[in-house]
Amino acid sequence: METAKAGVKKINKSTYLEWFELMLKIRRFEERALMLYGQQKIRGFLHVYIGQEAVAAGMESALRREDAIVTGYRQHGTAIGRGADTAACMAELYGKATGIVKGKGGSMHFFSAAHRYFGGNGIVGAQIPIGTGIAFAEKYKGTDNLCVTMFGDGAARQGALHESFNMAMSWQLPVLYVCENNGYAMGTSVGRTSNIQEIYKLGLAYDMPSEPVDGMNPEAVHKAVTKAAEHIRAGKGPYFLEIRTYRYKGHSVSDPAKYRTKEEVEEYKEKDPIKVIEQTILSKKYASEADLQVIKDKIKAEMDYAVEFAEQSPLPDPSELFTDNYVEPDYPFITD
Amino acid sequence: MSRKLALRDALREAMVEEMRRDETVFLMGEEVAAYNGAYKVSKGMLDEFGPKRVIDTPIAELGFTGIGVGAAMNGLRPIVEFMTWNFAILAFDQIVNNAAKTLSQSAGNFSCPIVFRGPSGAAGQLAQQHSQTFESWMANVPGLKVISCVHPADAKGLLKSAIRDENPVCVMESELLYGYQDEVPEGEYLVPIGKAAVRREGTDVTLVTFNKMIFPALEAADELAKEGISAEVIDLRTIRPLDHQTIVNSVKKTNRIVVIDESWPFAGVSSEIAYVVQKYAFDYLDAPVTRVNAADTSLPYASTLVDAYMPDAARIVKAVKEVRYMKA
C-alpha cells in the first residue's frame, strides 16, 4: 500500500466502507431521480451518473476539501462526492427554493462555494478553461490547492481543451484534468469522434503527464489521483487522467441508447463498480453482509428523507427571478 | 487640476491605479505585456507589475477568456483585453454562457467580477471581419454591463468603476480614437456606470449617441447651429444599464430625437432607444423617432464603400432636418 502524504488517507478497511457508502448513495440518488422524472416530479434535462460512481469515490478520498472541482452536466455524483447534502440536491431537481442553488440551476447546475464545488456546466467543455482559471487563481494566491477539471469524452474533442492544455502547461498551473471517458458522446462512440481513441494521448502532445485509469475501481482512481496530486502540489504543473468508465443509462432520460448493444451493456454490468466493491469488502472481510445492510438501510432512509424534503419544500417566489442576475439588489431591469 | 491625456493613456491610468490599489487585479490578453499592447494601452505595465500580473496569452480567445472567468469565480479580478471585440466572438461562450450566468446559475454561490475590454467599431478600411460593433450584442445579455465611451476622462473613470464592479463588465473602446486627447482630471475619481453625459445642451432636437459617433454628432450640432437649430447631444457612455431618464428628459424638452448608432440597424441600441422614447415621451414627440445607423450590410474595403456605410455629420444633419420637417 502506498503511503499517502499528509491530508491524504491510506487505503484501508474504512476507506473501502466510505467508498461503498458514497457510491451506493450516488447510485440510489440517481435511481430515485430517474423514478421521479418518470412521475414528472423532475423536469428539464436529467443526466445520471449510474456506472461512474467509482470515479467520484476514488477521487474524493485522494483530494483535500480545499481543492476545487468543476465539471460538466453529468454532475450529481460529483457534487454528492464533495459532500453536498442529498436533500438539497433532490430539492434542486424539484426546482424548489430549498435546493442547493435555490431551484435556479436544476440537474445540470449544482454549485456550492462551501464545498469548493464550482459547478456543473451545461456547455460541453466550457468548464475546461474555467477549471484552468480556477487553478490559475490558486497559483496566483500562492496556495498549494489544485483544481480538478472534469469533462467527458465528448468534451475532449472541443478546441477549448487544447487551448487550456497549452496555457496550463505553459504557465505550470495546478490543475488536474480528468476525462471521464464513458465511451459515448451522447450517441456517438469515442471511435467515431477521432482517430485518436486513447484520449489520454491528447495530453502527451503538450508534454503533460497523462495516463489511462480504470474508472470502475475506486482504488485505481484513488491511486492515480494521489500520484497526480502529489505531482501538481510539488509545483510541477498539470496532470491528465483519462478515467475509463461506463454509463449504464442513456445520455439523458430521453435517450433509449440504441447505439450500443445489449451485450455491451451486460458486459459492463458484470463490472458494476458497486457490485465489485461489495464483493471485495466481503471477500476481504472488511465487513459482513449484515454490516453492509446497515449502510444500505441508512442510505435508503437518507433518500426517503431527501424526497420528502423536496416534496414538502416551497417553490421559489416569482420575485426570485430578479435576484442573482447582478450582485447589487437595485439593478434597473427593463420591465416593460 | 487636469492635463491632456490620450484615450489609451487614460485607460492605462485606470488599470494601473486599480492594480496598485488591489493585488487581485491583473491584465491578460494577446500582446499586452512584452509588446506593450497592440494599441499601446498597456505600455509599461509589464515593467511595473511583472509577468505575474501582466500576462501575454497565446492566440486562444476562448481559452484565455475562460481562464479569466474561472479566476474571477475563484477570488481574482481579471481584466481580459481583446485585440478587438471582433476576436471576442471566439470567446462568446465564456462571456455569454458563463461570465453572465455564473451568479444566476449558482444562485449567488459564485460571482464573476471580470472586465472584458477592447476596441469595437469600424476603424477605416479593415474590411468585413474587423469592423463590427458589439454594444447591442453584449447589452442584450442579462448579467453583463456594457460601457462604450471614448472621452478620455470618462473612459478612465468608467474603467475604474468596471474593475471595481462585482459583475462582469464589457468595455468597448475605439481603435481610431486611442490617440484622441482631452482633459483628464488629476487624482482619484470614478465615473458611475449607467449614467449618460450631456455633451452639449440644446433646445430644438436631441442627438443621442455613443463611442466615436459622438464626433459626427457634435460636428452636426455645429452645422445645425449655423442654421439656427439648437441640438442637445447626449453621450450614453453606458449601454447596459441604459440611462433612460436622461434621454427622456431631453426629448421632453426638445420634442425631437435622432439616434446615431454605428451598429447595424436591426434590433440595435437605436431600436431600444426608439422604444423607450415612444413609451415614455410619446405625448412630447413632434416627429417620429429617427435614427442614423451604419448600413445594413457588411463593411467592404474600398474607401467609397466605407464612406457609404458609416454614419457622418451630413447624414445626421439630414435626419435632423427630417424631424424638423425642413427641406434638406
Image: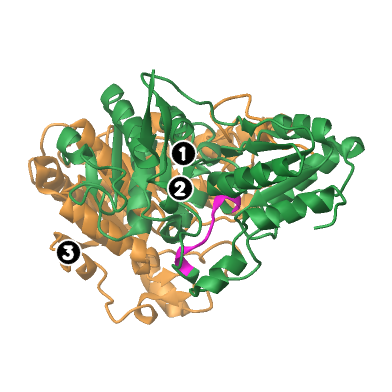
Q: Which chain is green?
A: B
Q: Colour of chain A?
A: orange
Whether label 2 touches label 1, CB < 8 Å: yes
Q: Position of residue B15 (x, y in %)?
A: 33, 33
Magenta residues, start to end: B129-136
| SS for dot 1 | loop
Closer to us: mark 3 or mark 1? 3
Asked if the stretch drawn in magenta spans residue B9, the answer is: no
Judged by depth in the image, the label closer to the viewer, 3 or 2, is 3
Please report, as a chain letter, where disc 3 is located.
A
Q: Residue furthest front?
A: B226
Q: Three-letter amino acid code at disc 3?
A: Tyr
**In the foreground, A177 or A12:** A177
Give the spatial CA distance, label 3 vs label 1.
Answer: 31 Å
In the rendering, at what x and y percent does residue A265 appear?
43, 72
- Disc 2 with disc 1 on a shared chain: yes
Give the number of the disc on residue A120. Answer: 2
- Identify the residue position indicated by label 3 in the image: A206
Distance from Cα at disc 3 to Cα at disc 2: 26 Å
Please, what is the three-letter code of the amino acid marked with disc 1?
Phe
User: What residue did someone put label 1 on?
Assistant: A111
Say if residue B302 shows up in the picture: yes
Relative to residue B152, is residue B93 depicted above or below? Answer: below
